[in-house]
Amino acid sequence: MKRYESYDLIIVGAGIIGLAIAYYGTRAGLKTLILDRGNAAKGTTSAAAGMLGVQVELQSRTPLYPLAKKSRQLYAQLAEELMEQTGTSIGRTVSGAIKPAFSPEEWKKLTEIERWQTAAGESVQCLTAAQLYEHLPFLADGATGALYFPEEAHVEPVQTAAAFRQAAVLQGAELKTYTGVCSLLQNGDQCEGVMSTSGEEFYGEHVVLATGPDLLELSADRTLPIEGVKGEAIRVQGKRPLVTKTLYHEHFYFVPKPNGETLIGATSGLSRDRRATVQGIGEVLRRARQLVPEVARAEITKMWAGVRPQTTDDLPLMGPHPSIRGCWLCSGHGRNGILLAPASGKEMVAAITSGKAEVLQAFQPDRNIKGGMNREYQSQ
């Protein structure tokens, strides 16, 4: 059995969350190893839409809101920093986002959102129906108005993950792909490293589990409230862009991409099935035509599905393992993994290096977790 050198930080999982931790870890001077059973950013990250939907999706009362705002701000810095360091663009586009209302009940909810966001100093505008259709001429008839969030943005997830990976490696991180981890190496309740599926041992002072729905198997704690939530999506190309701003309505979204394509997707429910199915894609197409009828004339250029790790209270698990010293968890970000990656990586490294995790208090893995109410609409 081969024993490898010791590290300050071992990260299991090379999705965008793990790579962001590696980026900030190496910036803090930590000798860092990243392990993944496949290739980097080929799981949940590669299936993401890339929305940085802070205002359009999250509610004021969720602890995610300040973390998400910080992450959106970090992306503005990272777009320049990562390009300068690696030459890779993360595709950050500040297109703004629109949330329309098609009924009095929906408009009432939007006015409540506008009220608290304005009071909180956020940038948000109420649009009349006429103003809405100026922004989104292909939107279905019947909308009575909308909220417009001009600061909302989106990135290209795979490019962003690649930039984090390249920067982390340039800063000294070691990345081992196709190296699955089967268990933690423990001395009593102290984690000392991990063992790979081929029997290799990797030792480190701190181990962060940043995997997806399979976190339960690695963490040695099957009581952690992680579940898989499936999403299915398509990319389409029209003669003209279907939307020029992100369109979000009841967990359904259209995201304009720089190449003129539009990404369309939805959450479909609890599942670990990563296949794009006829039923699932058919439902995406049905809802897409309802919201933007012009999509029927567009060409489908790609279709896929992905599974996101999500907790039962919709807040990620970030912080020390409840019962294993030296082991940290950073998972369960649900549909907000791309959005939250920079702030999650930065705050996790700050907690690891300082031994203090006050900023992550609401996300501690040992918290009392109840049913989720943190998004305006529940996953369907």
Image (tube, rainbow, N blue to C red):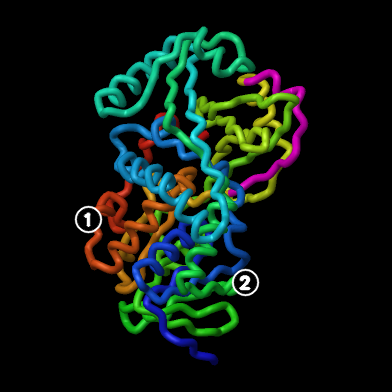
Element assignment for label 2 = loop
Residue type for callout 2? Tyr
Within the magenta stretch, is there residue 221? Answer: no
- Would you name the residue on which mark 2 appears? 178
Q: Residue at x 50, y 69 (%)?
A: 170
Toward the viewer: 199 or 94?
94
Indicate left or right for 67 with 299 as reference.
left
Give above or below for 178 relative to 142: below
> Where is residue 31 shown, x and y percent of the image?
40, 76
Q: Residue at x 40, y 65 (%)?
A: 221
Screen quadrant of the N terminus: bottom right
User: Which region is colored magenta?
Assistant: 292-306
> Where is residue 59 shown, x and y percent of the image?
35, 32
Indicate left or right for 263 with 269 as reference.
right
Toward the viewer: 107 or 138?
138
Indicate left or right for 372 with 252 as reference.
left
Residue type for callout 1? Glu
- Would you name the residue on which mark 1 appears? 358
Location of residue 324 by image quarter: bottom left
How busy is the neighbourhood of tag 1: few (under 14 within 10 Å), some, or many (20 plus)? few
Reading the chain from its start, which is encountered first: label 2 or label 1? Answer: 2
Seen as rendered, the residue at the extreme bottom is 1
Element assignment for label 1 = helix
Q: Alpha-carbon distance for marks 2 and 1?
A: 35 Å
Q: Residue at x 35, y 41 (%)?
A: 69
Location of residue 24 by image quarter: bottom left
Give above or below for 207 relative to 137: below
Q: Residue at x 65, y 33 (%)?
A: 262
> Where is residue 94 shown, x and y percent of the image?
49, 35
Give above or below for 212 relative to 191: above
> Where is residue 160 shown, x and y percent of the image?
54, 52
Indicate left or right for 366 with 163 as reference.
left
